[in-house]
Image (tube, helix red, strand yellow):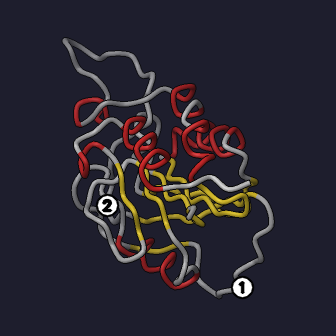
Amino acid sequence: MKFDVLYVDPPWQYNNKKMGGSHKSGASQKYTTMSLQQLIDLKQYIDPVVKNNSCLFLWGTTPMLPEAFQLMKAWGYKYKTLFTWDKGGYKTGYWFRGQTEHCLFGIKGRVAAFRSGEKNIFFEKSESHSKKPIAMWGIIKKVLWNKEVLELFATQQSKPLWTRIGKEVTGNDIIFDLKQLVHDHYVIKS
């Protein structure tokens, strides 16, 4: 069995300069971040557990959108559209105060268009750092109701038909978790 859908909230590594003392970007204060190349290198562990015809939902903060597009392409997915999450209130930012985050959607192989009528923008007040909106889960559940979803870098326990891996859920490094999926649960069929 392989997954139909990848849902990923990468621990983006921001290359901003330190601003006084030991201040680092907000993300690196909360969890271990990964460079774009480290994220691209996960492809070797993702490919064996994801179907050739699959979908990718990939979160990218506004300053990291160029890297998100690069990552999507490097993992073999073709960009189709995106979702915009209005977090309700001004957040951080250097050029402008951000209030939105985006989830890129792409496909690999042959995936028929959903034609669901779902809007690609939604409002949901943000909660804790990096916690993603319930609305996005609802959209995926509606358009892919019977599909197996693999969530990478998960921060909460599993929802029905979702396998969630990541340090906050399993306590393990993402590479360890991906290798475990390949080793313990999936038989690669040619």
Q: Nearer the viewer, mark 2 or mark 1?
A: 1
Instruction: Identify the mark nearer the N-term, 2 or 1.
Output: 2
Residue 77 position (above or below residue 107): above
Horizontal side, residue 132 vs residue 101: left or right: left
- The outermost residue toward the top is 21
The picture quadrant where one finds residue 5 is bottom right
Of residues 67 and 123, the one drawn nearer to the viewer in this rendering:
67
- The outermost residue toward the right is 110
Of residues 171 and 190, the one drawn nearer to the viewer in this rendering:
190
Mark 2 and mark 1 in contact? Answer it, CB < 8 Å: no
Residue at the spot 72% in from the left edge and 63% down from the top edge: 53
| Residue 53 badge | none
Question: Which secondary structure, mark 1?
Answer: loop
The residue that disc 2 covers is 89
Residue at the spot 71% in from the left edge and 61% down from the top edge: 107
Percent x, y of residue 161: 42, 74
Question: Which secondary structure, mark 2?
Answer: loop
Locate the C terminus and report the quarter of the image it occupies.
bottom right
Residue 138 position (above or below residue 89): below
| Residue 115 badge | 1
Percent x, y of residue 138: 43, 80
Residue at the spot 31% in from the left edge and 30% down from the top edge: 32
